Image (cartoon, rainbow, N blue to C red):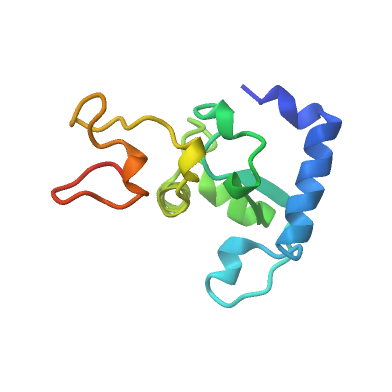
Amino acid sequence: MRWAGYRTRRWERLRETILRRDGYRCREAARYGLAVQADTVHHVWPVEDFPQFAWEPWNLIALSHKAHNEMHDRVTGALTEKGEAWRRRTIPPPHDRPPCRCSWGPGRGTLSDGGRKKRGGGCF
């Protein structure tokens, strides 16, 4: 299901802001020293799973159409390994972090530790 926010003027303005912030260059290609024009803005933390991050600039990156297609499994809609890698590298700011879903249980392994991995594991 496609997020309704994509059809809004607010999204059009934010999309343009992100493309401009990233210099209209694909962030994935830039990791490899390549200059590829970006035409798409990607939610690193998927809006379907994390709607609270939908409008957050830290959660948005400029990508080429090809790179964006490599972030998602187009059959299931799930993130590919490449998309998951971006999500793992993009840690929400402390005020936006979701609750921990690790096996340590409620109140344990949360992100109140500043995003550092705890000794022996943890989700962030």
How many numbered discs, if any? 0
**Corner quadrant of residue 80:** top left
Instruction: In the displayed orientation, state which residue is furthest to the bottom.
Output: 33
Query: Where does residue 20 sit, x and y in percent of width and height?
Result: 79, 59
Residue occupying image coordinates x 26% and y 51%: 117
Residue 16: give x, y in percent of width and height: 81, 49
Q: Name the outermost residue toward the left.
A: 120
Residue 86 place in picture, x, y as percent: 47, 52
Q: Which quarter of the rendered picture does the N terminus lie within?
A: top right
Q: Nearer the viewer, residue 105 or 33?
A: 105
Q: Is residue 51 left or right of residue 55?
A: left
Residue ID at (53%, 74%) = 32
- In the displayed structure, 27 sits above or below 104; it is below
Q: Viewer-proximal residue, 117 or 32? A: 117
* Furthest residue in direction right, as rendered: 9
Residue 39 seen from this side: no
Is any atom of residue 59 visible in this view? yes
Say which residue appears at 59% left-offset and 67% top-offset: 29
Q: Position of residue 62 (x, y in %)?
A: 67, 55
Left or right: residue 11 compared with residue 71: right
